[in-house]
Image (cartoon, helix red, strand yellow):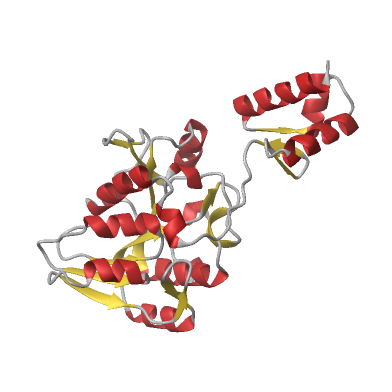
C-alpha cells in the first residue's frame, strides 16, 4: 500500500467513525505505529485532520475568539431559525436573562412581546435592539466591555445577579463537547455565565450545529447542568443520542424552517429545576 493510499484510507475511516486511535490504524493498515504517526503528522500539517491524545479526529476541536461581526456571518440562516424557536419559549410576564453571542442576538431580533417582559442583558447589541420596546423592562449589566463580543464581563457584571431570580437564561457558547462541557473563549465570560445559571431556573443553550465537538478555552459547565439545547438539523446523529442520554432536552430546528423535538426529549414545562448550587 502506498503512502497516498494509506492517507486516503485514514481519511475515509475518519469520515465513518469520526475518530480512531493510532493503535487501531496500525492494525487496520498493517503498518507500524511509527508509520501511522508520520502519516498523521503529514495529514495534520495539510489541515486534513487533527491529532489529539494518541488518536486522529476529523476536525480541530479547539475554537478561537473572533469578533461578533465575523461570527454573525457564520450559519446565519441556522441562527435565525434557532432564534425564532427560542422566542416561542418566552411566556407572558416572563423574566429572562440573555447572555452574549450572535445566536442570542438572533433571538433578540425576534422578541416583540405584547405582554410585559423583563430582560437582563450582558450584550450591548441585544440591549440596543430591545431598549426601545415599551413592553420590555431592560436591565443592562455593567462591567468591563469585551470589544470582540460587545458584551460586559467581570465582577461588576456578576454582582447584581444575586439580587434577581429569573425563569430562563438564554446563553450562546463557543463549543459543546460531551466530555468537557459547554465552553467559551474568555474566562471572564465563563464566570459571568455561571453566575447567570445560578440566577435562572432553567438554562437554555442556543447553538448552531457547528459548535458541537468544539472546545473553547474556558469551561462554563458540564452538559448535565444545562436544561435545554436548541440547535439546527445539521447536528450529527451521534451527538443527538449522546445528549439525550445525558438527560438534556434537545430541540432541533430543521434548516427548512420546521421544528423537530428530539424523540426522547422530556416536555420542557414539566422538567424539574436542576440544582444550581455547584455553579455559584
Residue 204 visible from this viewpoint: no
The residue sitting at 45% across, 67% down in the picture is 193
Residue under the image location 74 percent in, 35 percent down: 43
Q: Is residue 12 above or below residue 119?
A: above
Between 17 and 125, the one lying in front of the other is 125
Q: Residue at x 26, y 51 (%)?
A: 269
Q: Position of residue 189 (x, y in %)?
A: 50, 69
Outermost residue to the top: 1
Whether residue 96 is visible, yes or no, is: yes
Where is residue 241? Give x, y as percent: 47, 35
Which residue sits at x=16%, y=60%? 112
Work out whether residue 74 or residue 166 is closer to the camera in this orientation and state it. Answer: 74
Residue 246 in the image: state x and y as whole percent: 49, 44
The image position of residue 53, as x and y in percent, is: 76, 45
How many badges with numbers are in the image? 0
Residue found at the very far left of the displayed protein: 114
Q: The N terminus lies in which quarter of the figure?
A: top right
Q: Is residue 226 above or below residue 267?
A: below
Q: Nearer the viewer, residue 243 or 36?
A: 36
Amino acid at each position: 500500500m502506498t503512502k497516498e493510499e494509506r492517507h486516503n484510507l485514514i481519511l475515509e475511516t475518519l469520515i465513518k467513525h469520526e475518530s480512531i486511535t493510532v493503535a487501531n490504524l496500525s492494525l487496520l493498515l498493517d503498518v507500524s505505529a511509527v508509520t501511522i504517526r508520520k502519516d498523521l503528522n503529514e495529514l495534520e500539517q495539510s489541515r486534513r485532520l487533527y491529532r489529539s491524545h494518541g488518536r486522529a479526529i476529523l476536525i480541530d476541536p479547539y475554537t478561537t475568539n473572533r469578533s461578533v461581526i465575523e461570527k454573525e456571518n457564520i450559519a446565519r440562516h441556522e441562527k435565525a431559525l434557532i432564534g425564532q424557536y427560542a422566542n416561542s419559549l418566552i411566556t407572558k410576564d416572563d423574566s429572562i436573562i440573555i447572555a452574549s453571542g450572535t445566536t442570542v442576538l438572533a433571538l433578540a431580533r425576534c422578541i416583540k412581546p405584547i405582554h410585559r417582559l423583563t430582560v437582563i442583558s450582558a450584550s450591548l447589541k441585544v440591549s440596543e435592539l430591545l431598549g426601545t420596546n415599551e413592553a420590555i423592562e431592560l436591565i443592562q449589566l455593567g462591567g468591563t466591555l469585551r470589544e470582540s463580543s460587545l458584551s460586559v464581563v467581570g465582577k461588576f457584571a456578576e454582582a447584581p445577579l444575586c439580587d434577581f431570580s429569573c425563569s430562563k437564561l438564554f446563553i450562546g457558547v463557543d463549543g459543546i463537547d460531551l466530555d468537557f462541557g459547554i465552553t467559551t473563549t474568555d474566562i471572564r465570560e465563563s464566570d459571568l455565565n455561571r453566575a447567570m445559571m445560578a440566577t435562572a431556573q432553567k438554562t437554555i443553550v442556543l447553538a448552531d450545529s457547528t459548535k458541537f465537538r468544539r472546545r473553547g478555552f474556558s469551561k462554563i459547565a458540564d452538559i448535565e447542568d444545562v436544561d435545554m439545547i436548541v440547535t439546527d438539523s445539521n447536528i450529527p446523529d451521534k451527538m443527538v443520542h449522546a445528549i439525550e442520554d445525558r438527560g438534556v432536552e434537545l430541540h432541533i430546528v430543521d434548516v427548512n424552517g420546521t421544528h423537530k423535538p428530539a424523540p426522547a426529549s422530556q416536555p420542557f414545562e414539566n422538567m424539574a429545576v436542576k440544582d444550581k448550587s455547584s455553579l455559584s
